[in-house]
Amino acid sequence: MATKRGNIGSLQKVLVWAKENPTTEEINKKLLLVTDKEGWTVWQLVAGRGYIETLLKLWKCAKVSLTTEEVNNKFLLATDNDERTVMHLAVQRGNIETFKNYGVC
């Protein structure tokens, strides 16, 4: 994943693609709900690294593209291979303020 390697520019290009009217299913499969080999979603990677602007763009995209159940169960509460949620990663890396300051949670 682009964010894991620190290539936030690639992720920005993907977010631009997401605005070009792909189907909700395409957005979910190719952006919001896809995981890497460690089970991390792009949401977990961005939150864990503290990329605030990108986090907010993903949050907005998720609220539009996912059902409430998907936002809760597959986005906010998704776990990686070590059973860590996005909040665990943010706390572990000292980025919990990212969520609190921007009203994500």
Image (cartoon, rainbow, N blue to C red):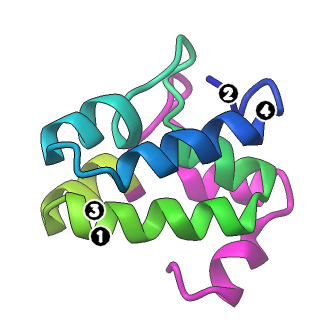
Residue at figure coordinates x 63%, y 86% from the top left? 102
Q: Position of residue 61 (x, y in %)?
A: 37, 62
In the image: residue 3, left or right of residue 95: left
Query: Residue 80 or 98: which is nearer the viewer?
Result: 98
Looking at numbered disc 3 in the image, what kind of residue is underneath it? Asn
For the residue labelled by badge 4, is the local secondary structure a helix, a strand or a loop? loop
Q: Position of residue 64 (x, y in %)?
A: 24, 68
Distance of label 3 from label 4 (alpha carbons) = 27 Å
Sequence-wise, the earlier of marks 2 and 3 is 2
Sequence-wise, the earlier of marks 1 and 3 is 1
User: Where is 41 relative to 1, above or below?
Assistant: below
Distance of label 1 from label 4 (alpha carbons) = 24 Å
Assess whether mark 4 and mark 2 are in contact (beta carbons under 8 angstroms): yes
Residue 77 appearing in the image = no
Circle 3 Cα neighbour tier, 10 Å, few/some/many (<14 / 14–19 / ≥20)? few
Assess whether mark 4 and mark 1 are in contact (beta carbons under 8 angstroms): no
Residue at figure coordinates x 14%, y 38% from the top left? 25
Looking at numbered disc 1 in the image, what kind of residue is underneath it? Lys
Q: Is residue 86 magenta?
A: yes
Q: Which residue is mark 4?
A: 7
| Viewer-side label of 3, 4 | 4
Residue 9 appearing in the image = yes
For the residue labelled by badge 3, is the local secondary structure a helix, a strand or a loop? helix
Quarter of the image where the N terminus is located: top right
Residue at figure coordinates x 72%, y 49% from the top left? 48
> Which numbered tag is attached to residue 63?
1
> Which numbered tag is attached to residue 72?
3
Q: Which residue is mark 2?
A: 2
**Magenta residues (range):** 76-105
Circle 4 Cα neighbour tier, 10 Å, few/some/many (<14 / 14–19 / ≥20)? few
Distance of label 1 from label 3 (alpha carbons) = 10 Å
